[in-house]
Image (cartoon, helix red, strand yellow):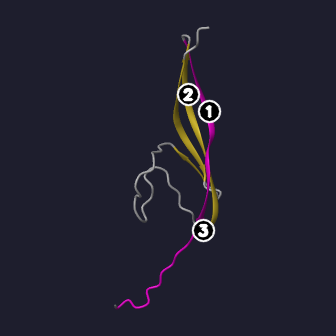
Amino acid sequence: HDGITIDITANPGTLHVDTGDRQHQTCRHTVPYQNPIGVNKPSPYCGHTWDQPGDYTITATRTWHITWTANGHTGTDTTTRPAGTHHITVIELSSILTNPNQ
């Protein structure tokens, strides 16, 4: 039997994030993890700030754009799949300046 060659390419689209605090984000430009950006600097790609301390579950879904060819036929499709779930604890820190003259 002759086999069929199928070429499939899947490119990542938007990332939809439920941040666990009744907020949702749609991240259109995501990049692989890089070194930390710095303290008190927002993410240039897709960030979120929690307003209250607590335990949160972050759930992400990714949209994929798919193209394929097989035996002279071509097609496209779009699908959305779970990208992951992560649990975090947000804490709040406060500092007190006790002797401003030192």
Q: For mark 1, what is the residue?
A: 79
Q: Is residue 42 above or below residue 81?
A: below
**Which residues fall within the magenta stretch?**
73-101
Q: Quadrant of the N terminus?
A: top right
Please give left or right for residue 11 compared with residue 20 in the image.
left
> Which residue appears at 53% of the width and 37% of the height?
13
Q: For mark 2, what is the residue?
A: 66
**10 Å crowding of disc 1: few (<14), some (14-19), many (20+):** few
Q: Are marks 3 and 1 in contact (CB under 8 Å)?
A: no
Q: Is residue 68 above or below residue 87?
A: above
Q: Which amino acid type corresponds to the residue marked 1 in the rendered image?
A: Thr
Q: Quadrant of the C terminus?
A: bottom left
Q: Position of residue 40 (x, y in %)?
A: 43, 65
Q: Are marks 2 and 1 in contact (CB under 8 Å)?
A: yes
> Which residue appears at 52% of the width and 75% of the height?
93
Q: For mark 3, what is the residue?
A: 52
Marks 3, 1: nearer the viewer: 1
Is disc 2 placed on a helix, strand or loop? Answer: strand
Q: Position of residue 32 (x, y in %)?
A: 45, 46
| Mark sitting earlier along the chain (3/1) | 3
Inter-mark Cα distance, 3 to 1:
34 Å
